[in-house]
Image (tube, rainbow, N blue to C red):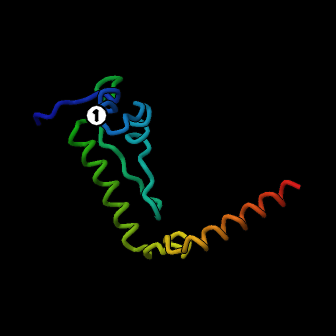
Amino acid sequence: MNETFLTFSEASKTIPGRPHSSAVWRWARHGVKVRGSQQRVKLQHVRAGARLLTTKAWLDEFMHSLARADADYFEGQPALSLPQSAKGTRTPEQRAAAADAARTRCLASKK
């Protein structure tokens, strides 16, 4: 194996969003719960004395495993349908009427 080992601090700097090294430790020790099940995906690591180490390849596999689990979960979910008002199909008059009604409710709640 010619893989370079990374400390959790070094590993955290290679991940988008730069999570804290304690998050990387948590992923390795406890894992991340998969949506819709009690399973957990754990980051592979090794211990060298008192240090916990991982590799870039193990980080990639961890993130891909989470992405696959999310895809599996959402694949079985029904497509979201937006309410009519969120679809942007109201006329300017309907928008103005809705704004007036909201303004009236807001003023009434302040009394």
Q: Residue at x 36, y 47 (%)?
A: 42
The extreme front residue here reads 93
> Which quadrant would residue 4 be assigned to in this image?
top left
Q: In the rendered view, would you say 28 is above or below 110?
A: above
User: In this orientation, which residue lies closer to the viewer: 17 or 69?
Assistant: 17
In the picture of the structure, the residue carrying the numbered disc 1 is 14
Q: In the rendered view, would you say 70 is above or below 28?
A: below
Q: Position of residue 106 (x, y in %)?
A: 77, 58
Q: In the rendered view, would you say 65 is above or below 26?
A: below
Q: Position of residue 20 (x, y in %)?
A: 42, 31
User: In this orientation, which residue lies closer to the viewer: 98 or 5?
Assistant: 98
Q: Residue at x 33, y 25 (%)?
A: 51
Q: Secondary structure at mark 1?
A: loop
Residue 48 vs residue 90: left or right?
A: left
> Which quadrant would residue 46 be assigned to in this image?
top left
Query: In which quadrant will I find the C terminus?
Result: bottom right
The extreme right residue here reads 111
Residue 82 vs residue 24: left or right?
A: right
Q: Residues within 10 Å of mark 1 (few under 14, many from 20)?
A: few
Residue 38 vs residue 63: left or right?
A: right
Q: Position of residue 77 (x, y in %)?
A: 43, 73
> Which quadrant would residue 28 be assigned to in this image?
top left
User: In this orientation, which residue lies closer to the viewer: 3 or 91?
Assistant: 91
Q: Residue at x 45, y 53 (%)?
A: 33
Q: Residue at x 61, y 73 (%)?
A: 94
Identify residue type, mark 1: Thr
